[in-house]
Amino acid sequence: MALYLINLPFAGVGLDMAKRDGDAKVVLIEDGVYADVSGLDNVYAVKEDVERRGVANRVGGAKIIDYDELVDLIVDNKVVNFA
């Protein structure tokens, strides 16, 4: 299972790859919280990044996680970085 770390400006490429990976987990970091993740399951967004940008209402179905949870995801999965 791959963990896709998504930030701008490479969000489009990373999300396209994640959509083709049936087991993908996607984590929106920093400005990646602005990305459109419609059509994806297993989406996470880093709480501090969501709060700093005031986009809590835009991350819809994403699970909000803290840095400790992000580290756990990174350790437990193969990471594909688009940050």
Image (cartoon, rainbow, N blue to C red):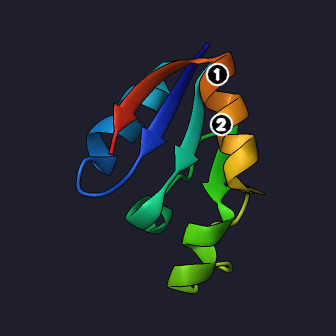
Q: Residues within 10 Å of mark 1 (few under 14, many from 20)?
A: few
User: In this figure, what is the number of numbered marks?
Assistant: 2
The residue that disc 2 covers is: 71
Check residue 75 in the rendering and tell me which mark sits there, or answer none: 1
CA distance for labels 1 and 2? 6 Å
Viewer can see residue 64: yes
**Of residues 16 and 74, which is closer to you in this image?**
74
Which quarter of the figure has residue 82? Answer: top left
- Quadrant (top left/top right/bottom left/bottom right) for the C terminus: top left
Above or below, comparing residue 45 to residue 59 in the picture:
above
Residue 27: x, y in percent? 56, 44
Left or right: 18, with 76 as reference point: left
Q: Is residue 76 above or below residue 36?
A: above
Looking at the picture, which amino acid does disc 1 mark?
Answer: Val
Among the 4 quarters of the image, the one containing residue 46: bottom right
Residue 64 shows which numbered tag? none
Q: Nearer the viewer, residue 58 or 65?
A: 65
